[in-house]
Amino acid sequence: MVRVDSAPPLTFREQGVVALISTGHGVTHYLHSIVLVVSPLIKEKFNLSYTELGLFFTIYTTGSFLSAITGGPFADLTGRRQLLQVLSITILSLAVMFLGFANEYAVLLVIGVFIAFSNQLWHPAAIPYLATRFHSHRGYVMSIHGMGSNIGDVLVPLLVPAMLTGNYIIIQLEPMSWRNVMVINTLPGLFILPPLILRAVRERAGHGHETSLNLRHYIAGIIDQGKNKTVLGIGLIAGLRTTAQSGSRNFLPVYLVDQFNWSLTQAGIALLLLNLGGSVAAVPAGIASDRCGRRKVMLIAIAAATIFILLLPLLQDEFLIVIGICLVGFSIYATRPVLISWMMDTVESGFRGTATSLMFATQSAFSIPSMAITGVIADIYGIAAIFYWFAIMLLFANAVVFVLPKDNP
C-alpha cells in the first residue's frame, strides 16, 4: 500500500488527465444507466413478470461478462488501453442510439448486450492506466474515477424520466418520444470522444505510458496470479459486493413503483440519491484507504452497507425511505475505489488489465444467476424480500475481507 501523504501532489496537467478519463468513465455509466432507469417502462411495455425482468437483466449482464473476459487480456497483451477507451465510448453511443429504434423484445436484448459489453470494456483500459501512471495516489485517483461513474449514474435518473414524462419537477413540458430521448442522450459520448482520441494519438506518438506483454510471459504471469490468495479473495469480494449493489440499483425503481406507487420521476430521483450517496463517499473512502489501509476501510464500509440494506425494506415513510436509500448508496458505493485500488496494489503493472477483468468477470458471473434468482424471490416472497438476499451477499463479502491478510504497514 502506498501512503498518499509521502508523495508530492499531482500537477495541474496530471489532474487534467485524471479528470478527462474520469469524465469518460462518467459518460459510459450515463449511457449504460439509461436501460436501468427505464426498467419499469420495459417491464410495462413488454408485460413482463419479475422473473422475466430478472431474465432480461441476466442476459443484459452477459454482455458485461463477455467484455470482462476479453478486454483485460487484450489490453495487457497489446498495451492499447487508450484505443479501448475510445472504442468503448463509440460502441456505447451507437448502441444507445439504436435502442431508440427497438420495437421487438429480442432486438432490445441484443442491443442491451452491446451496451453492457461496451460499458464494461472501459474498465480494463482505464483503471490499469490510471493505477500505473499515478501509483503514489492510487486510492485518490481511483476514487475520482469512481466518482465520475457515480455522477453519470446520478444524472440519468434526473434527466431521462423527465424527458420521457415531461415532468421536470418545477415545470411540465411535452413528453419526448422514446426514440428522441435515446438519440439525444448519445450527445455526451460524441462530446467526450474528440479529447480522448486526441490524447490517445499524442501519447501514442510519444510512446508514453502504454506497455505490452508477449504471450509467453503473459501466460506465466497469469498462472502466478492464479495462485495468489489475495487476488482471488478480492475477486470473490467484488462478485459478492456487486451482486448486492447492482441488484439494489436494478430493482429499486421497480420496487418503489410497484410497492409504493411512486411515479417514474420519483423512482428516478430515488436512484439518483442512491448514486449521489456513492459520489459523496467515494473520495473520502479512497483517501482513507491510502492512509489507513484498504482492508480496514472495506470491513467498515461493507458492515455498514449490510445494516442499511437490511433496514431498507422495513421503512414505510417516504422521508425515511429516501434517507435509507442515501445511506445504502453512501456505504456500498464507497467500497468500489477501495477494492479496485487493493487489486491494483496486489498485482504487477503488466497484469492490471487482466486483474481488472478478473474482478469484473467475477462480478458478472455472480450477477448473471443472481438477477434471475432475485426475480424468482420477488415473485414468490414479494419484492421487498430481495433486500434480504442482497444482505446475505454482503455478509459473505465481509467474511472474505476478514480472512484476507492485513495491510502492510
Image: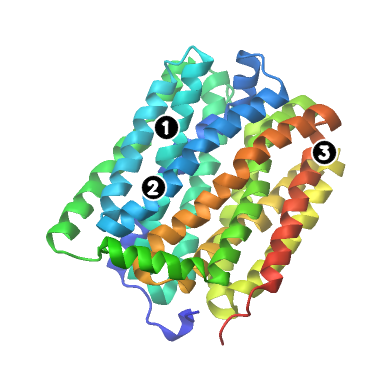
User: Looking at the rendered structure, which numbered label has been put on residue 366?
Assistant: none
Disc 2 to disc 1: CB gap under 8 Å: no
Q: Amino acid type of disc 3?
A: Ala
Q: Amino acid type of disc 1?
A: Phe
Horizontal and vertical percent position of residue 260? 80, 28
Q: Residue at 63% across / 80% down in the picture?
A: 406
Query: Which one is in front in this view, the residue at disc 2 or the one at disc 1?
Result: 2
Q: Secondary structure at mark 3?
A: helix
97 up-or-down from 407: above or below: above
User: Looking at the rendered structure, which numbered label has been put on residue 114?
Assistant: 1
226 and 344: which is toward the camera:
226
55 up-or-down from 363: above or below: above
Sequence-wise first label, 2 or 1: 2
Q: Amino acid type of disc 2?
A: Thr
Horizontal and vertical percent position of residue 29? 47, 42
User: Looking at the rendered structure, which numbered label has been put on residue 385?
Assistant: 3
Q: Is residue 380 left or right of residue 109?
A: right
Image quadrant assignment for residue 335 = bottom right
Q: Residue at 66% across / 30% down in the picture?
A: 54
Is residue 84 visible in the rendered image? The answer is: yes
Q: Residue at 54% across / 37% down in the picture?
A: 61
Q: Secondary structure at mark 1?
A: helix
393 up-or-down from 155: above or below: below
Name the residue at the left extreme. Answer: 205
Q: Is residue 214 left or right of residue 354?
A: left
Q: Residue at 52% across / 56% down in the picture?
A: 359
